[in-house]
Image (cartoon, rainbow, N blue to C red):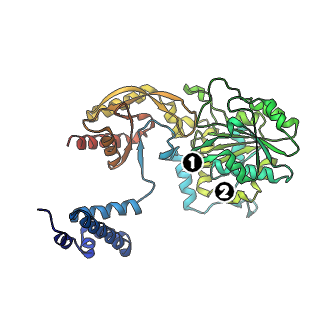
């Protein structure tokens, strides 16, 4: 017979009893007594609510487990490590570009010591936190100077605000109607322009815009021409977009700067890897863009940042705007950006930068790893598939890969959930009612974690 509400309530342990259990006592030793007590009381409150609803009380062991789990989620290291077996190289939800060990060490070293962040060692006086990054951006892109801010969206906002505030009589910024886009997180170009104080002037049509459209829209109130790379979608068919060089010709004719928001921002020729050509930062600079804006954590393969490269006069204008301090980045990110750019200057991006390791790895090497997973677990079969670049870069572009495809006895959703609940969470993808694990995006030292997660999920699936 089910317990009566009275007996169920009486079966509940006291807060002190929960605190004295071995697992919770460990929490008390590591965290504050008051914080753990609050958790225990909350768990007991949920148990009382359950009794009220269905006359059943959770077991003491279940309550202890819940306290421990909640403490781990709330106070444990975060973000938690996961294995990206989705095959999406730049997975936005999983933190986009992982950093190389060299870059991570640079950030760690910067965090744990004093540094010359804003100090000139030669003169013994205050220095510029942007000078070193400016030099590296110049060397990497061919630009005269550069600046780093906290992400590309803030880079766009800062740049527009600086450019339109330079002359109060010039606030209009010309944008192709097909480039007044919205990208991830609700970032809309018209909204950002409004916040910056710029007046949007749309030209052309959604699918076709010409250089002459820009020239026809220029007035004495024009502050700049803005080109926006539609990084997360593709318009195909009856389309036309003018070359950046043609837009620059129009701009120079009327003394109007061209700002090029590349979005992803790539320093290498992606055609080498069987992909379409992604606009390169160096090309934007050589074509004459006054300012080129791009992300640090997409195809650059570094930390989240917004990078701006261009003519020194315009970089100086941007860096001196009041918003520059509001969107500046910390010393750890600056260190990581510097180390990332150095990898390109050494031409070592394929060896040192994880996303380019993933992209450049041969399909045969990937197939060998997938086969190793199959042999070690006895699960699934190795099949050819496609990996995506993701992260708003090279939309629709994929590269060949091999995956371990598993058809679980039970639900594919449940099997995928079990992979995520293993000691080191493994995130896979589901296609055609099967769970696919793609080695392309799995670090070489994570094979064991994948194998153990598959075994764990198979054990749960067989029950």
**Mark 1: few, some, or many residues within 10 Å (few <14, many ≥20)?**
few
Among the 4 quarters of the image, the one containing residue 384: top left
Residue 162 position within the rendered picture, expressed as x and y whole percent measured from the top left: 77, 52
Q: Residue at 42%, 27% (x, y): give it.
A: 385
Closer to the camera in the image, 139 or 453: 453
Left or right: residue 17 compared with residue 284? left
Left or right: residue 24 compared with residue 144? left
Instruction: Check disc 2 and report its element: helix, strand or loop.
Output: loop
- Asked if residue 338 shows in the view, the reply is no
Determine contact: label 1, label 2, CB under 8 Å.
Answer: no
Closer to the camera in the image, 462 or 195: 195
Disc 2 designates what residue?
A: 328
Q: Residue at 72%, 51% (x, y): give it.
A: 194
Instruction: Check disc 1 and report its element: helix, strand or loop.
Output: helix
Residue 110 position within the rendered picture, expressed as x and y whole percent measured from the top left: 58, 57
- Asked if residue 18 shows in the view, the reply is yes
Front position among marks 1 and 2: 1
Work out whether 449 lies above or below 370.
below
Among the 4 quarters of the image, the one containing residue 87: top left
Residue farthest left in this picture: 1
How many numbered marks appear?
Answer: 2
Quarter holding the C terminus is top left
Disc 1 designates what residue?
A: 185
**Mark 2: few, some, or many residues within 10 Å (few <14, many ≥20)?**
many
Tell me which numbered mark, 1 or 2, is placed earlier along the sequence: 1
Residue 423 position within the rendered picture, expressed as x and y whole percent measured from the top left: 33, 50
Residue 149 position within the rendered picture, expressed as x and y whole percent measured from the top left: 66, 52
Q: Tell me how far mark 1 sits from mark 2, CA to CA.
A: 20 Å
């Amino acid at each position: 017979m089910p317990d009566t509400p009275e007996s169920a309530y009486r079966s509940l342990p006291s807060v002190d009893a929960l605190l004295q259990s071995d697992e919770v006592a460990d929490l008390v030793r590591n965290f504050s007594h008051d914080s753990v007590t609050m958790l225990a009381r909350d768990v007991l409150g949920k148990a009382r609510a359950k009794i009220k609803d269905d006359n059943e009380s959770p077991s003491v062991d279940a309550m202890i487990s819940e306290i421990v789990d909640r403490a781990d989620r709330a106070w444990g290291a975060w973000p938690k490590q996961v294995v990206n077996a989705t095959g999406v190289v730049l997975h936005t939800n999983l933190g986009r570009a992982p950093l190389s060990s060299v870059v991570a060490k640079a950030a760690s070293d910067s965090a744990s010591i004093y540094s010359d962040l804003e100090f000139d060692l030669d003169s013994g006086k205050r220095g510029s936190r942007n000078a070193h990054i400016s030099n590296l951006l110049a060397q990497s892109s061919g630009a005269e100077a550069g600046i780093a801010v906290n992400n590309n969206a803030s880079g766009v906002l800062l740049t527009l605000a600086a450019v339109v505030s330079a002359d109060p009589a010039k606030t209009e910024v010309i944008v192709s109607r097909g480039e007044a886009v919205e990208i991830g997180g609700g970032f809309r170009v018209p909204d950002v322009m409004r916040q910056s104080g710029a007046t949007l002037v749309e030209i052309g049509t959604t699918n076709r815009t010409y250089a002459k459209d820009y020239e026809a829209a220029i007035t004495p109130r024009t502050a700049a021409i803005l080109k926006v790379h539609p990084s997360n979608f593709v318009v195909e068919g009856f389309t036309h977009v003018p070359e950046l060089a043609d837009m620059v010709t129009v701009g120079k004719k009327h003394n109007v700067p061209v700002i090029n928001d590349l979005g992803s921002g790539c320093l290498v020729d992606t055609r080498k890897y069987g992909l379409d050509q992604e606009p390169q930062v160096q090309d934007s600079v050589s074509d004459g863009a006054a300012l080129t804006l791009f992300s640090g954590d997409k195809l650059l393969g570094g930390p989240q940042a917004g990078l701006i490269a261009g003519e020194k006069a315009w970089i100086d204008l941007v860096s001196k705007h009041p918003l520059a301090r509001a969107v500046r980045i910390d010393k750890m990110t600056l260190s990581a950006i510097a180390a990332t750019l150095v990898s390109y200057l050494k031409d070592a991006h394929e060896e040192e930068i994880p996303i380019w390791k993933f992209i450049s790895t041969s399909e045969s090497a990937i197939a060998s790893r997938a086969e190793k997973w199959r042999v070690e677990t006895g699960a699934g079969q190795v099949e050819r598939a496609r990996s995506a670049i993701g992260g708003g870069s090279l939309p629709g572009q994929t590269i060949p890969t091999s995956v371990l495809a598993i058809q679980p006895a039970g639900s594919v959703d449940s099997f995928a959930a079990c992979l995520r609940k293993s000691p080191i969470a493994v995130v896979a993808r589901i296609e055609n009612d099967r769970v696919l694990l793609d080695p392309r995006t799995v670090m070489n030292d994570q094979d064991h974690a994948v194998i153990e997660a598959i075994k764990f999920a198979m054990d749960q699936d067989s029950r």
